[in-house]
Image (cartoon, rainbow, N blue to C red):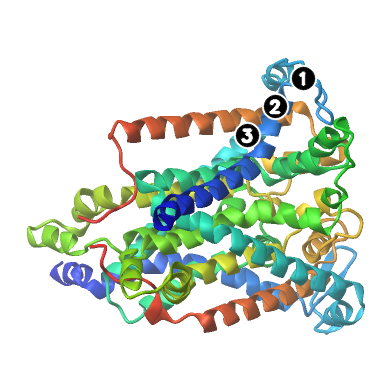
Amino acid sequence: MAAPRRLFYRSETRFLLLGLPGVMFVVFFLLFPIVSVIVFSFWRTESYEIYADWNLDNYRTVLFEGTYLTFLWRSIVTAVVVTAACLVYAWPVAYFIAKYGGRYRLLLVLALAAPFFTGAVLRLSALQAIMGPIGVINMALGMFGLPAVEFLMFNKFASGIGIAYLYLPFMVTAIYLSLLNFNFQLLNVAKVNGARPWRAFLTVTWPLNWIGTAIGITLVFIPCLAESLTPTFLGGPSGKLYGSVLGLQFDQTGTWALGSAMGVLLFAVCCVVIAVMWWTIDLRRTGFTGAGR
Amino acid sequence: MARRVDRWLTPVALGTMLGLLYVFLFAPVIYLVYTSFARDTTWPFPWNPNVKAYLNLINLRAYQEALWNSLGIGLWTALISMALSAMGSIAVLKYRHRWRGWFSIVLISPMFVAELLIGISTLIFNRKVLGLPGNVGSAVIANAVHGMSFGFLIMLAQLVRYDWRLDDAAMVFGANPWRTFWHVTAPNIWPAMLGAFVITFLLAFNNLEISFYNLGAVPTLPSLAWGSLRYGLEAELFALAALVNGVVFLAFVVIYVLMRLGIVRFGYRGI
């Protein structure tokens, strides 16, 4: 009786008891599925059934039959542009909430999450109804005899706005969470030592909050890369992205093995992005000074 | 003089940016609520408000079923995610174990896997490897993997400043770990746990890309919307979304009032 009790009180045991369930959960329900996708990508599908003959045909199709790589390249470009735009807009907003939000900070951040209570399908169709050719914006312009704004209709730009619409809150939240642990008094120190506001930002605030920013960049970039929903509403005929094509393999055409290979490729690109972001992070400069205590 | 202008100009400019962001984020939602009172969803102008769509909802079984399924997925996912992320974040922050770095990386990793990939990989794993049919359970698990990482990040960010010596103090005075958690840790960290719960609920409640591949024929609100897209969205769908938003808005008002009255305070601020 005494021995197991003592074991329970040891901090090592308690660490494992608390941490292992989550880790096992990830291993079972994320790692195993991803491994099975990698395995399936080397198999073959025929009339909705999957057969275990090992081959590289799926990769040959994805990499050398033109269209798939075109979609992937288009997705990458879209993701880079949208992420950059989100970054530029999210920083000032997150900074404002963290510095001037006072005790309503959490409410302000939750308000950013509130639109998520409406499904992406409905919100995007509403966005389409606002920006499209017979949408609110263009009809209102027409009423005043102004020409319609064509760049908001069924093209890559409209698609980009839609994707930014979906993921901008993630970027703001990530940067905000980082700023929450940032000691703003450091800026006063910089000021006292003669730094102008911009210089203080570039040498103190930005590097010390880089980890949150990097998480935000990754959090926006990856779903952008895999985006399949938005182009359906806003992208028009030439706006189809890699994610939509990938989804089709599992939905309509039933070519699971090819879809798996596309998934592995997508996963590989994501891993490269994560590796690059990880490489830029210096854990010793996380911005946590311990001064909040 | 310039200094003084600077002092209010910066917050005003940044605040305006936040305001514009709210307008951008909420415009489609407001449009949706507006349209739910119109009969014609493709061109709802001029506005002749009626509540027909809301009355129709009472008789539409498919919509009610979808709502319950979505709520179920959201709540179960949020519960599992919150429990696992709370346990994980306490383990990583409280105990200086040599594996804590690795545990953190594993727990946070699902966040960086695209939803689409989680969806198709769990579909493949469940269907072809385990031979399970798609149902609400597998959708909950797939969503919970994703949600847990968000919960973990939220809890980490809020609990970095928690002083674990409080727990040690309780233990010194003879409380067992369970009692310590309920009487000391939980009362201090509940805002962080609530935040994790709300966010993971949100992500799962309206998730299309993870759930879609795991659900088989089970309808949820997002899959219903996705399915009816090719026939044009019905006003009833808008009405249901508007109702959900109404409830959420009310919740926000209640939270705001409670905060004004000083009954609740969110965010762990240190002691």
Q: Secondary structure at mark 3?
A: helix
Nearest to N terminus: mark 1 or mark 2:
2
Marks 3 and 1, how far apart at CA: 27 Å
- What is the three-letter code of the residue carrying label 1? Trp
How packed mark 3 is, by other alpha carbons closer than 10 Å (few <14, some 14-19, many 20 or more), is many
Residue bearing mark 3:
B67
- What is the three-letter code of the residue carrying label 3? Leu
Residue bearing mark 1:
B47
What is the x, y in percent for residue B202?
55, 46
What is the x, y in percent for residue B131?
68, 61
Residue bearing mark 2:
B34
* Residue at the image point whose x is 13% and y is 57% from the top: B170
How packed mark 2 is, by other alpha carbons closer than 10 Å (few <14, some 14-19, many 20 or more), is some
* Residue at the image point whose x is 85% and y is 81% from the top: A63
Q: Chain of mark 1?
A: B
> Mark 2 or 3, which is nearer the eye?
2
Q: Secondary structure at mark 1?
A: loop
Q: Chain of mark 3?
A: B
- Asked whether the residues under marks 1 and 2 belong to the same chain, the reply is yes
Q: Chain of mark 2?
A: B
Left/right placement of residue A96 relative to residue B239 reads left
Left/right placement of residue A200 relative to residue A73 reads left
Please tell me whether residue B229 is drawn above or below residue A240 in the rendered image: above
Nearest to N terminus: mark 2 or mark 3:
2
